[in-house]
Image (tube, helix red, strand yellow):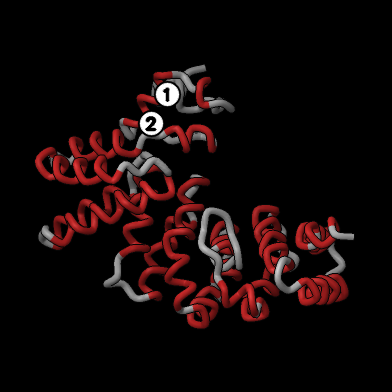
Amino acid sequence: MPAKDGNPYQERIGARKLADIPSEVVNLLQQGKLQSVNLTEWLAVDHLTLLQHIMTEFGMEQEAHAMMQRLHEAKETKIMKTIPSIATEWLQLFDQMPQHDSSRIFRTLAAHPSDSVRCWAAYIIGLDHRLSLQEKLASIRPFAADAHFGVREIAWMAVRESIAKELEQSISLLADWVCDPDANIRRFAIESTRPVGVWAKHIQELKVNPRIALPLLDRVKADSVKYVQDSAGNWLNDASKTNPDWVMQICDQWLKVSDTKETKRIVMKAKRSLDKKK
């Protein structure tokens, strides 16, 4: 059945292998006219090709030439390097423009139909040194709540370095996030502060002293949403690599005060690496 907007690919089930993605879908993804629906498609996007389309969409062909040349010369192929590189180019371009123009373009990127383009916008926030930590977190919030899984992941990665540099203030600011009705916001607060995390630099201070994050973790010890439960369990599993006794203590405490299936599930995930050592 065709989608309501006439696009037959809008409600598709994504391919599991890169080679199985229809060429029409790849083209639409790289034109910014379609969102990816799974990790395979998300990784398949050629961000430089997409950027060329977006610059043309904005009527910025002249500005695109130098930007594209620098990005091609960098020869960066890893997506987690390419996205920040593109965001850096946008920031440099914005510095040369009147603020009302740069603000308009950023708003367009932030609300773009392409999840990949919204990922650039999230990193633009994370890399903007003019913004304070509080301003970055306030600006990244819509991306943390985005309906697309990829944008949500990039959102916490984009500000993780800022969070790590000002950890105490970050924990204080994120304390409200773990009480938010939106599970995506609660999950962001936990995922962004994981001691190790995925595709991210370690937060050494939390590896040494994970109890710093207890004001966040305690709030989600019985969270009703598996998305948040998984993040909390993974957080503690990270901590178990350097502080196994502390993680065991926290798990035991949680089970005593919250004998629920949700807490038990978190504890099971938290102790999985420790259980393997038995």
Q: CA distance from mark 2 to mark 1?
A: 6 Å
Q: Is residue 258 above or below residue 25?
A: below
Q: Nearer the viewer, residue 178 or 161?
A: 161
Q: Nearer the viewer, residue 160 or 133?
A: 160
Q: Residues within 10 Å of mark 2 (few under 14, many from 20)?
A: many
Disc 1 on helix, strand or loop? Answer: helix
Q: Which residue is mark 2?
A: 29
Q: Left of 75 or right of it: where is 11?
A: right
Q: Is residue 168 above or below residue 66?
A: below
Q: Are marks 2 and 1 in contact (CB under 8 Å)?
A: yes
Q: Residues within 10 Å of mark 1 (few under 14, many from 20)?
A: many
Q: Is residue 51 above or below residue 161?
A: above
If the image is split into quadrants, where does the C terminus sit? bottom right
Q: Can residue 125 be seen in the rendering of this structure?
A: yes
Give x and y (percent) for residue 132: 34, 76
Dot 2 amino acid type: Leu
The label shown at residue 275 is: none
Q: Left of 273 or right of it: where is 22?
A: left
Dot 1 amino acid type: Val
Q: Can residue 181 be seen in the rendering of this structure?
A: no
Q: Left of 162 or right of it: where is 198?
A: right
Q: Which residue is mark 1?
A: 25
Q: Residue at x 52, y 82 (%)?
A: 168
Q: Residue at x 42, y 71 (%)?
A: 162
Q: Residue at x 35, y 24 (%)?
A: 27
Q: Nearer the viewer, residue 77 or 37?
A: 77
